[in-house]
Amino acid sequence: MLQKLDNFFGITKLGSNFRIELLAGLSTFLSLSYIFVVNPAILSAAGISTSAIFFATIVGSVITTLLMGLWARLPFAVAPGLEMNAYVAYVVVGVLGFTWQGALGAVFWSGVLTVILSFTPLRINIIKAIPDKLKSGLAATVGVFLILIALKVSGILVYEGIQVKGIGSLASNEAIVFFAGLIIVAILKYFKVRGSVMLSIIGAAVVAHFIGITQAFEPIKLSKDMFAATFALDWRIIFDPKIWSVIIVLFILDFYGSIAKFIGLTKNTSVIDSEGNLPRMKEGLVVDGAGTVIGAATGTSNLITYVESAVGIGEGGRTGLVAVVVAILMSLFIFITPLINLIPVVATTGALFFVGAMLFPWKDIKNYLWIDTIAVLVMIAVTIWTFGLDKAMFAGFASFVVLFILTGKWKQLNPYLIGSTLILLLSIWLS
């Protein structure tokens, strides 16, 4: 049985083992478990019942993450994206005035568009068109994004909306837990202790409880209200021209956001092959798009590949078994909530920071040309300023294209890279 699983997922082939994969799955789950609390809190502002969103978040995430593990066989977790749910709740419904059913319809059609294009060579061609140095830059950008999440949750960086407003207290209880987790994971990694990320989260949780940080989330009881948003989307919204710009924005955020994550999460790992390509990427991209369709059908906003998957990959996870473990834990969330409460979200911040730093392409930096360096630095700066991977991609691509044109190298530019730059600009303008 174990040998069949090994052969199916390619565990030994990719330099992993069952223990590592299980630990990686648990680590990834703990790092993203906050979404089951946060997503209902945000989307409820659109008028959807909290219990319905909670149900949709779990069901949609479980189905899509299982598909990612069993079909695409990649170590990625899939769940509702924070950038997406905020846009749906506060802009599509709150500002533009669409009903939540119409908003879910827009999410649905953006997912359909993503799936259709994922079956074509377009998405793969776009990925191949991105120069290796920019791919390394995307890995660094994803790393910075994880670092920002860690600093934001721990209160070290103070945000107003999506913009940094200042530095918080370095002596607060949350900051103490952050530093404790970071020190633990750094020491354990230095001594090459297996499970160091997971152990650092547990150690930070112990520190958190010792200094009085706790969290409480009451499980939502099973009721008919949980199914209120299931298949409630208004698919006919596609015939309203006013919703088209919303569909385009959601599509572009999902389409290019997943490209950034697929590249950033796997760069410089054994998940990619000797030629630098990600096996079964097409299947993974299809699942990523299908997740949005599934999410809309169950009653939530776009499901995306989670950057917190980097925690499990940093733990050594390399195969789809990681995703399967995450999906199983997601399905048990209602029953294991008391255990999750033992690990406050802030307890994961040290591990997130460390994993984010490890995503930096330290070995590649010395080979950067000045154009590459500027493009990557621009991406990092925009990530810090806007807290958005799509905007960072646009800034990096745009600076790269402009610099190549100004230096007379415009003939070397790939049309897919130029087209992607213009499409990302369109999404920013529309949003």
Image (cartoon, helix red, strand yellow):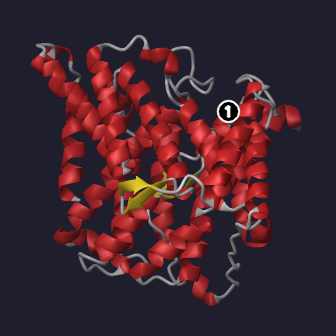
Tag count: 1
Q: Please provide percent x and percent y for residue 151.
A: 52, 50
Asked if residue 266 can be seen in this view, the reply is yes
Relative to 377, say whether 107 is above or below. Answer: below
Quarter containing the C terminus: bottom left
Q: What amino acid type should be assigned to the residue bearing mark 1?
A: Arg
Outermost residue on the top side: it is 367
Q: Nearer the viewer, residue 157 or 115?
A: 157
Label 1: which secondary element: loop
Query: Residue beneath label 1, please?
Result: 318
Q: Please provide percent x and percent y for residue 10.
A: 72, 29
Relative to 121, say whether 114 is above or below. Answer: below
Residue 38, quarter of picture: bottom right
**For the point 70% across and 84% down, which residue is it?**
221
Q: Is residue 12 left or right of residue 238?
A: right
Outermost residue on the bottom side: it is 224
Quarter containing the N terminus: top right
Asked if residue 66 can be seen in this view, the reply is no
Residue 422, quarter of picture: top left
Q: Please provide percent x and percent y for residue 362.
A: 50, 20
Q: Please provide percent x and percent y for residue 248.
A: 26, 56
**For the point 26% across and 19% down, which residue is it?**
371
**For the point 79% across and 25% down, which residue is it?**
191
Q: Is residue 355 left or right of residue 340?
A: left
**What is the crowding at mark 1: few (fewer than 14 residues within 10 Å), some, or many (at least 20)?**
many
Q: Nearer the viewer, residue 207 or 320?
A: 207
Q: Nearer the viewer, residue 84 or 387?
A: 387
Relative to 405, say whether 52 is above or below. Answer: below
Residue 119, quarter of picture: top left
Q: Is residue 70 left or right of residue 114?
A: right
